[in-house]
């Protein structure tokens, strides 16, 4: 007898259940059902060349081996990812709870009041920490949020700016490099020019439509952007700020010194690094810009009895309604991770967050003082959690790196020779001792660091420090014990319907059930505690998993290669369109800008096409959602000279496999 199959438990259909279902739809077998629903000429002609399916036990052993192949180092790399402490009450009651991870996009507000409240908590926390009145309920990640901010500022140009073709975006030189990379890609497709420079030398005469700065910046410095923002606004240039959410507990919020947009990652609010994701980005702006904002917004409304009720607000901005005229192709984004971050804010409350932020900053100050005594020059005039060190002439970066790796420590190594250290919530006395020992050895010092207590030491000055209150709502002040939080989470759960309660009769790209055996390995430190910029020899498990999955997906889809970089289906659409655009450009056909898209396609399709610099043209469909072949032929002929692509959702949003799909492609 063989081991029990994964699908037997995961899907749970018994032979007699299958027989009844087949009888109900009027067929005698699954093969007959496939014959009637999937066109014969698109079915595989030979079996897929894939590894043999594993039992759950075999999979658990294999995935555990892969996780153990990653080497867990203490990370001080920073650059947008930090080790953090996920409260066990949140990990067990939200992350591992199918009520939260199987619930559908809350289009039906009446069965979604629990998760809508959790997401409203997220928006409230973001709004109050950034000092801006309106926040959405998550974007995909910080880098793409930067691109959304740039696109939004571009769309908000004045009539004069549009008339004068004002198309330059200013980006400060000390933004995170991965963010700049994504901006270059996204803005290039939109025909927007990026100018990278020092914000202190900002030339308002150049007529920028927008500017983006980092706060604190990539080097860790806390800059005073007030005069810069005033100068930018005087020339009708809007300002977006990439902000560290934890730092805003102590620092003056961007909204209070004039920023138009604040965005960033909520990863520090209890979300593991996971080799770079996923974690929810945040996005906040001024009320007057709400109709140009990307992403979903949860609002307070009234039910039929006149009581307060929550729902998704201002949906007319979004792709499922506006399609090619939407403010963004963003769809579901990172709701589960935003929910976890919101409960982190609820659990700690304003005082708990202050304690965490002050401790991070105080440890950074202690490390800075000790390193100064050892002869290392700290280059930041002010900082929250990150130090940039200039090494003495007799000490090399490579020498420090070797000593650090001997103690399983990763630091940031600048191309110009400096070293970066970013402190986080997990940095305790032992870790400080180990960190300082590395630099003491490099300096030839025999000093022994006894770190028993770390006194509060705030080095930030005057108007750098936050004076405004935040998180004053009772939701952030009543649930600070595990029992109180658990009861609050359960109260919200009871307002929702998920796969833990019943079947959900909505279908979309988000309706996939993650089995418990698939989620359990995510608790392994070998997956959780890996920084995305960790050296390659430390991430062999991740590399093996990624390459194997890419290979299997290539076999399943019939393509030569695959990429796992896109963070959502909409991001995947955009990436695919970029490949098409790059290919056309490479063969001298870059003028082709028309993309044909059936009316039955998902709304992200036309929105992604616009984002990628194409012009979507709608192809008619019949009442059943099938593509009107005559209209397709007509549109192909009309746009013969500028046709770039045909973009189809398959099966369509009606659940239809188009019988004539090969003819469409040909």
Image: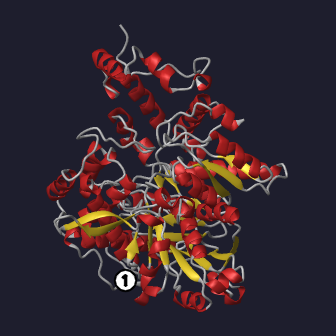
Q: Quadrant of the C terminus?
A: top right
Residue plotted at (56% across, 45% down): 621
Taking depth in this image into account, of 647 and 330 the one nearest to the observer is 647
**x, y percent for residue 649:** 55, 43
Is 470 situated left or right of 474 in this image? right
Is 227 situated left or right of 101 in this image? right
Graded by Cα atoms within 10 Å as few (under 14), some (14 to 19) or many (20 or more), the crowding at tag 1 reads: some
**x, y percent for residue 129:** 37, 75
**x, y percent for residue 517:** 35, 32
Is residue 188 visible in the rendered image? The answer is yes
Q: Quadrant of the N terminus?
A: top left
**Is 422 above or below relative to 101?**
below
Is 258 situated left or right of 194 in this image? left
Taking depth in this image into account, of 379 and 61 the one nearest to the observer is 61
Taking depth in this image into account, of 10 and 180 the one nearest to the observer is 10
Q: Residue at the far right: name it.
A: 588
Query: In this figure, which colouring scheme has been used for the structure?
Result: secondary structure
Residue plotted at (36% across, 15% down): 3
Is residue 460 visible in the rendered image? The answer is no
Name the image quarter holding residue 123. Answer: bottom left
Residue plotted at (25% across, 52% down): 111
Residue pointed to by mark 1: 466
**x, y percent for residue 145:** 52, 64
Element type at marker 1?
loop
């Amino acid at each position: 007898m063989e081991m029990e199959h994964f699908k037997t438990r995961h899907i749970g259909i018994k032979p007699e259940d299958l027989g009844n279902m087949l009888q109900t739809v009027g067929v005698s077998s699954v093969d007959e059902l496939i014959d009637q629903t999937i066109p014969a000429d698109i079915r595989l002609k030979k079996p897929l060349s894939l590894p043999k399916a594993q039992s759950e036990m075999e999979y658990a052993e294999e995935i555990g081996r892969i996780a153990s192949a990653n080497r867990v180092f203490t990370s001080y790399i920073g650059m947008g990812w930090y080790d953090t402490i996920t409260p066990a009450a949140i990990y067990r009651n939200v992350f591992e709870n199918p009520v939260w991870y199987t619930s559908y996009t809350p289009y039906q507000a009446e069965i979604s009041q629990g998760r809508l409240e959790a997401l409203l908590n997220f928006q409230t926390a973001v709004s109050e920490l950034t000092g801006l009145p309106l926040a959405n309920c998550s974007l995909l990640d910080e880098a793409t949020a930067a691109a959304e901010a740039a696109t939004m500022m571009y769309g908000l140009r004045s009539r004069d700016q549009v008339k004068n073709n004002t198309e330059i975006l200013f980006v400060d030189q000390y933004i995170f490099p991965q963010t700049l990379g994504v901006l270059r890609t996204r803005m290039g497709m939109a025909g927007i020019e990026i100018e990278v420079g020092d914000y202190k030398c900002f030339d308002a005469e150049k007529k920028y439509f927008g500017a983006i700065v980092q706060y604190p910046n990539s080097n860790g410095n806390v800059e005073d952007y007030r005069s810069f923002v005033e100068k930018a606004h005087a020339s009708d240039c809007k300002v977006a700020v990439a902000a560290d959410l934890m730092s805003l507990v102590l620092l003056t919020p961007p909204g209070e010194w004039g920023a138009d947009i604040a965005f960033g990652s909520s990863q520090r609010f209890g979300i593991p690094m996971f080799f770079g994701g996923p974690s929810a980005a945040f996005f906040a702006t001024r009320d007057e810009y709400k109709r140009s904002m990307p992403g979903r917004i949860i609002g307070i409304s009234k039910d039929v009895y006149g009581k307060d009720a929550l729902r998704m607000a201002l949906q007319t901005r979004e792709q499922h309604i506006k399609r090619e005229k939407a403010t963004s192709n963003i769809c579901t984004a990172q709701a589960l991770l935003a929910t976890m971050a919101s409960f982190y804010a609820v659990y700690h409350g304003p005082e708990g967050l202050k304690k965490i932020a002050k401790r991070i900053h105080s440890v950074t100050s202690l490390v800075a003082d000790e390193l100064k005594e050892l002869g290392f020059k700290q280059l930041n005039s002010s900082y929250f959690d990150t130090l940039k060190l200039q090494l003495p002439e007799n000490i090399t970066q490579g020498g420090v790196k070797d000593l650090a790796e001997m103690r399983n420590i990763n630091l940031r190594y600048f191309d110009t020779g400096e070293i970066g250290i970013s402190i986080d919530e997990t940095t305790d006395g032992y870790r400080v001792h180990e960190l300082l020992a590395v630099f003491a050895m490099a300096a030839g010092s025999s000093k022994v660091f006894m770190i028993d207590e770390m006194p509060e030491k705030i080095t930030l000055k005057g108007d750098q420090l936050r004076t405004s209150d935040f998180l004053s709502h009772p939701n952030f002040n009543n649930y600070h014990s595990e029992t109180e939080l658990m009861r609050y989470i359960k109260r919200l759960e009871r307002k929702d319907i998920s796969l833990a309660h019943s079947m959900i009769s909505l279908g979309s790209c988000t309706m996939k059930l993650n089995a418990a055996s698939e989620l359990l390995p995510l608790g392994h430190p070998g997956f959780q505690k890996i920084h995305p910029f960790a050296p390659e020899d430390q991430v062999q498990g991740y590399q093996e998993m990624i390459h194997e999955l890419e290979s299997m997906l290539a076999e399943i889809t019939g393509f030569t290669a695959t990429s796992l970089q896109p963070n959502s289906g909409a991001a995947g659409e955009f990436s695919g369109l970029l490949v098409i655009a790059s290919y056309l450009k490479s063969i001298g056909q870059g003028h082709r800008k028309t993309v044909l898209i059936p009316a039955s396609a998902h709304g992200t399709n036309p929105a992604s096409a616009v984002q990628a610099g194409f012009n979507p043209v709608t192809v008619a469909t019949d009442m059943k959602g099938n593509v009107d072949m005559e209209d397709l032929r007509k549109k192909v002929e009309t746009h013969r000279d500028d046709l770039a692509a045909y973009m189809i959702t398959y099966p369509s949003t009606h659940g239809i496999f188009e019988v004539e799909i090969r003819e469409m492609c040909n």
